Image (tube, rainbow, N blue to C red):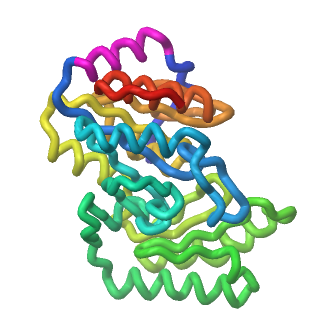
């Protein structure tokens, strides 16, 4: 990703009013949402990464309105996002960085992966287990993640992970990526940007859109959205990004989601 990023400014009232004003006047809208670090705080135990208080309620209202297409875009497996988010409404989920798509009816569509890709991912998992990292790996369709969040020797684990995964990526047609708290090899087709481009192509050009994400894995989605909508970096500390603006969770996150809810005619307070 050969892009020059800058630190985005804090979300201004002007941008917010413009977005919600267009939302009031529009008959179609899309809300793209990353999960970890965006809707939920990071946890060492990834099975305990539940949403910030209030997120479930406001998202449930937005889904029930029928006026916004809510699309989760995550590196996690679809079933993990659904379980942790824990809202009664079915919503669209793109898991494994866009390799798996689960529609609102629960039907799953997967990208076909080559035998070479599958063999490379399996070899990476086996080699990490041989080094004693079995508890720190996460195997998903088309992706293998190695987590070191919460470990004292994170730098040593990163060095070991790169020594194992870099050669596999180079020789196995995989792509190697850093993320907040780990390292991941993926099938070359894996891209959150692909999810965004696909959904945008299915909606009219006048649909109001926003993408909320926190990690470097969301940058290709920010770029894919471009000027078609508002991209928001959701983090406690700002960093260089392609996002249009920056907000801090959980307060500013909930303020934005609540404003979106009001703008589509749904009442409620978080």
Question: Which quadrant of the view contains residue 259?
Answer: top left
Residue drawn at 64 percent across, 78 percent down:
164
Residue drawn at 60 percent across, 43 percent down:
52
Q: Nearer the viewer, residue 65 or 245?
A: 65
**Which quarter of the image is occupied by the C terminus?**
top right
Residue drawn at 44 percent across, 28 percent down:
268
Q: Is residue 137 above or below residue 59?
A: below
Residue drawn at 39 percent across, 51 percent down:
72
| Position in image of residue 96 (x %, y %) | 43, 65
Q: Main secondary structure of the magenta part?
A: helix
**Residue interval drawn in magenta:** 12-24
Q: How many marks?
A: 0
Give left or right: position of 168 versus 127: left
Q: Nearer the viewer, residue 31 or 63?
A: 63
Question: Which quadrant of the view contains residue 48?
Answer: bottom right
| Position in image of residue 105 (x %, y %) | 24, 63
Q: Nearer the viewer, residue 234 or 169?
A: 234
Give left or right: position of 223 versus 135: left
| Position in image of residue 22 (x %, y %) | 26, 18
Q: Is residue 203 visible?
A: yes
Kindly give the residue lying farthest to the right in the view shown.
152
| Position in image of residue 50 (x %, y %) | 60, 54
Give left or right: position of 6 versus 113: right
Kindly give the residue lying farthest to the top in the view shown.
14
Q: Is residue 6 visible?
A: no
Q: Is residue 100 above or below residue 178?
A: below
Give left or right: position of 96 versus 145: left
Asked whether residue 23 is drawn in magenta, I would say yes
């Amino acid at each position: 990703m050969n892009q020059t990023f800058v630190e985005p400014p804090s979300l201004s009232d002007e941008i917010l009013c413009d977005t919600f004003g267009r939302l009031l006047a529009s008959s179609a809208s899309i809300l793209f949402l990353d999960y970890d670090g965006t809707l939920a705080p990071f946890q060492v135990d990834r099975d305990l990464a539940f949403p910030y208080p209030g997120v479930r309620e406001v998202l449930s209202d937005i889904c029930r309105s029928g006026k916004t297409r809510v699309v989760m875009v995550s590196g996690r497996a679809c079933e993990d996002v659904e379980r942790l988010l824990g809202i009664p409404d079915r919503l669209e989920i793109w898991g494994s960085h866009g390799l798996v798509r689960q529609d609102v009816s629960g039907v799953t569509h997967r990208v076909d992966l080559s035998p070479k890709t599958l063999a490379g991912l399996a070899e990476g998992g086996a080699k990490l287990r041989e080094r004693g990292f079995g508890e720190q790996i996460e195997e998903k369709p088309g992706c293998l993640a190695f987590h070191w969040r919460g470990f004292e020797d994170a730098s040593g684990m990163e060095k070991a992970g790169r020594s194992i995964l870099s050669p596999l990526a180079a020789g196995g047609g995989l792509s190697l990526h850093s993320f907040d708290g780990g390292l991941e090899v993926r099938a070359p087709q894996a891209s959150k940007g692909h999810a965004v481009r696909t959904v945008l192509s299915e909606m009219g050009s006048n649909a109001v859109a926003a993408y909320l994400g926190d990690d470097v894995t969301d940058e290709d989605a920010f770029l894919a959205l471009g000027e078609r909508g508002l991209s928001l970096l959701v983090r406690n500390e700002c960093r260089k990004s392609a996002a249009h603006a920056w907000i801090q969770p959980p307060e500013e996150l909930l303020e934005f989601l609540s404003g979106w809810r009001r703008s589509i005619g749904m009442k409620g307070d978080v």
